[in-house]
Image: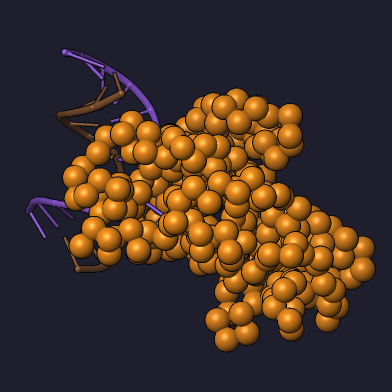
Chain colours: A orange, B purple, C brown
Amino acid sequence: MYEFDLSCPKAFNFIDVVYSHGWYQLPPFEWETDSESLTRSDDYGEQVIDWEMRATGDGKGVQLRTNAEFKFHEPLRRLGRQMLALDDEFDAFHQMCDLDPGLHAAKSRGKGRILRCPTVWEEVVKTLFSVNTTWNQTRSMTRNLVGKYGRRSPDGRASFPTPAIIAQIPEYELQQQCRIGYRAAPLALLARQICDGVMDLEALRSNRWDPDQAEAYLRSIRGIGPYAAANVMMLLGHYDHLPIDSWFRKTMRETWFYGQEATETEMAASFDRFRPFRTLVYLFYDWDSARSENR
DNA sequence: TTCCAGGGGTAGA
DNA sequence: TCTACCCATGGA
């Protein structure tokens, strides 16, 4: 087993990033509560690599562990940094946190980083699986897809299936095997579009994209609407498109709208003063305090 | 049986 | 911009 540390910013907490949203519960991520380690397996073509991240002993950094040979260490180091957003700056967001007491805790803990997947493809597929369903079913769909179609490491751990793998599987089989319902059609189509070079999701990580342009590109994917696109935008490091779903509506109703239903326009407007970090505010705001103030 | 869940697509007003 | 309707899945 090889071990090496990732250098981290001053205000950084590994567990906060892992718990920033639900991705750590979706395979191939595996979160071990006792050891507080995040494990996964990734398909590097010639082989599938098992690796894990955990907080260093002093709690301020991240240790990466793998049994992969040396040539994979630098790619894994880069991947770890990208997945934890270690090279992203959050100073402007933390400055903005002074605007509202509900954000003071987020600032003092240095929150803002969100756990990401290695590929935009994986982010989009998982987001597609979270649309119009329960979280338990999202977990089940992802587990099925990874378990049935992901290439396996020598230790038998499954990686997230690549577009090339999914593009070869008939739509009805995806639907039946993974229990993903109508999501099979957009999933199969997206995999084919990527393989045919019609769609290049990974290019969205580059800086040449204007955020609105990137959002429009995501919206052009079948099955990706306003909510799903905003969710992927957040994972790409753009925080101004609000992922308005049933949980968002419920939170708004219980806090800033005093028990009343609000339209999407009204809800979005209530976040105007937090541009361009509206999604981070939604994720890291102290909603529990806001709720108790309304009681 | 019916409703609902971390919505999307389409049509129509 | 908003509403109505349908879409599939499985648990309550």
Above or below, A208 against A77 in this view is above
Q: Quadrant of the C terminus of chain A?
A: bottom left
Q: Would residue A35 be visible to someone looking at this image?
A: yes
In percent of the image, x 80 and y 67: which residue is there? Answer: A6
Viewer-closest of A271 and A142: A271
Q: Quadrant of residue A157?
A: bottom right
Q: Position of residue A138 (x, y in %)?
A: 42, 58
Q: How many marks?
A: 0
In percent of the image, x 75 and y 72: which residue is there? Answer: A61
Q: Position of residue A72 (x, y in %)?
A: 87, 63
Q: Position of residue A113 (x, y in %)?
A: 62, 56
Viewer-closest of A227 and A268: A268
Residue found farthest to the right = A70
In percent of the image, x 40 and y 55: which residue is there? Answer: A179
Viewer-closest of A5 and A138: A5
Q: Quadrant of the N terminus of chain A?
A: bottom right
Above or below, A224 against A126 in this view is above
Q: Quadrant of residue A74?
A: bottom right
Q: Position of residue A144 (x, y in %)?
A: 49, 62
A70 vs A30, left or right, is right
Q: Would residue A148 be visible to someone looking at this image?
A: no
In percent of the image, x 56 and y 46: which residue is there? Answer: A96
A16 vs A51, left or right, is left
